[in-house]
Amino acid sequence: MSTPIPPHSAPPVLEVEELRTSLGSRRGRGNVVDGVSFSLSAGETLGIVGESGSGKTMLGMSLLRLLPRAAQIVSGSIRLDGRDIVGCTVAEMRDIRGAEIALIPQDPMVSLDPLFRVGTQIAETLRAHKPVAAGQAMSEAVELLRRVNIPDPELRAQAYPFEMSGGMRQRVVGAIGIACTPKVLIADEPTTALDVTVQAQYLALLQRLQRETGVALIVITHDFGVVAQICDRVAVMYAGRIVEQAEVGRLFDAPAHPYSRALIEASAAMANEGGGRRFPSIPGEPPPLFGRGEGCAFAPRCAFARDRCRREAPPQTSAGPAGHAVRCFYPLEGDAR
Ligand SMILES: Nc1ncnc2c1ncn2[C@@H]1O[C@H](COP(=O)(O)OP(=O)(O)O)[C@@H](O)[C@H]1O
Ligand SMILES: [Mg+2]
């Protein structure tokens, strides 16, 4: 099992090793996150791409230890600045969450309370983690709104979420995300609710905040355009596993996993047709969560699958340059397209 070495030279702020999260329901039990390993350095941006249901959000929620009741981390480690947070208590996690690792959820309305003014909500986040007086917290909240490009921040701090546009609400949750200068910030599908112009502005904002604070970013997305625009490295998820990870240019040029290659080819075809920003679709269906077999989860859809692929799950191995790793017995070589 080789954990790829990130191209950045700084020691990793986040090291995830063999993380496994299982989810149970009346229909059965399955691993929504299934042996995920990666590491991330300060100032680095990792994209996580994959079809809907591949476990991207569950991975993000696992890293924050914010899983729904039905799901638990069953094995593996999450080292944040050297400390394994899998063993942390609920109270310890309350201090760590927001202050050291923060998440901007998929839908900003979920994290904003409709009944409170946005300034108050940012100020409360600050006060949950440091001893500041209410007045001081409110002026810091106004400054944070200014940093995320909210016009008239003094006035806007008094607004309720419903009084703001989608783009502005997204920036408010961004402000909450960076309020306590976390070391790791996870943005789950940061652009799905936004139109293309607002999307580009929001990505530029995330990049600026990263330059200013050195935060390590994890961007969960189904949009290869977002990956190309802001990520240094990318991890492709399939059925709870990272099937390939590499530096972005390398993955686009020489994808080694048949799934990554199919996605990149479909995505290039979509772009040529001037198609929108959907996730590229490939033939077949992802496996159900319950009752996944022993072999490679992609084998039933894979044009290159052999008997071994249906019997055994491939381990993660190196695919050439440092940082390029793949979970495939028969990785592809040569250029995509
Ligand atoms: N609250 C939940 N209860 C039960 N199953 C869930 C819940 N959330 C997600 N799942 C299941 O977990 C798997 C991973 O989902 P998710 O992490 O949301 O995928 P993604 O974010 O990649 O679209 C899917 O099979 C999904 O149906
Ligand atoms: Mg999701």
Image (cartoon, grey):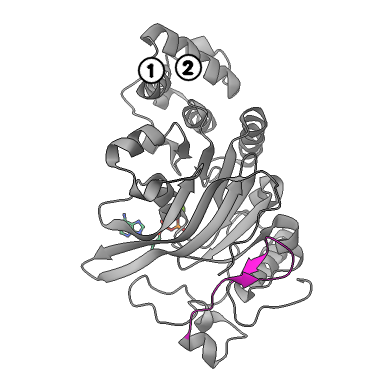
**Residue 325, magenta (yes or no):** yes
Report the residue that reaches farthest toward the left.
Answer: 26
| Residue drawn at point x = 43 percent, y = 62 percent | 53
Circle nearer the N terminus (2, 1): 1
- Locate the C terminus and report the quarter of the image it occupies: bottom right
Q: Nearer the viewer, residue 125 or 79?
A: 79
Q: Are marks 2 and 1 in contact (CB under 8 Å)?
A: yes
**Residue 116, magenta (yes or no):** no
Quadrant hosting residue 91: top left
The residue where tag 2 is placed is: 141
Residue 225 x/y as whole percent: 67, 52
First to last magenta residue range: 312-326
| Residue drawn at point x = 47 percent, y = 17 percent | 141
Q: Residues within 10 Å of mark 1 (few under 14, many from 20)?
A: some
Say above or below: 299 vs 272: below
The residue where tag 1 is placed is: 120
Three-letter amino acid code of the residue under disc 1: Thr
Left or right side of 133 for 150: right
Say above or below: 211 vs 20: above
Q: Nearer the viewer, residue 72 or 8?
A: 8
Q: Nearer the viewer, residue 93 or 126?
A: 93
Residue 49 x/y as whole percent: 57, 58
Real-space CA distance between mark 2 and mark 1, rounded to the nearest whole angstrom: 8 Å
The mark found on residue 268 in the picture is none
Q: Is residue 49 visible?
A: yes
Quadrant hosting residue 4: bottom right
Residue 29 x/y as whole percent: 28, 69
Residue 76 x/y as whole percent: 41, 60
Q: Quadrant of ligand 1?
A: bottom left
Three-letter amino acid code of the residue under disc 2: Ala
| Residue drawn at point x = 51 percent, y = 41 percent | 81
Q: Is residue 222 visible?
A: no
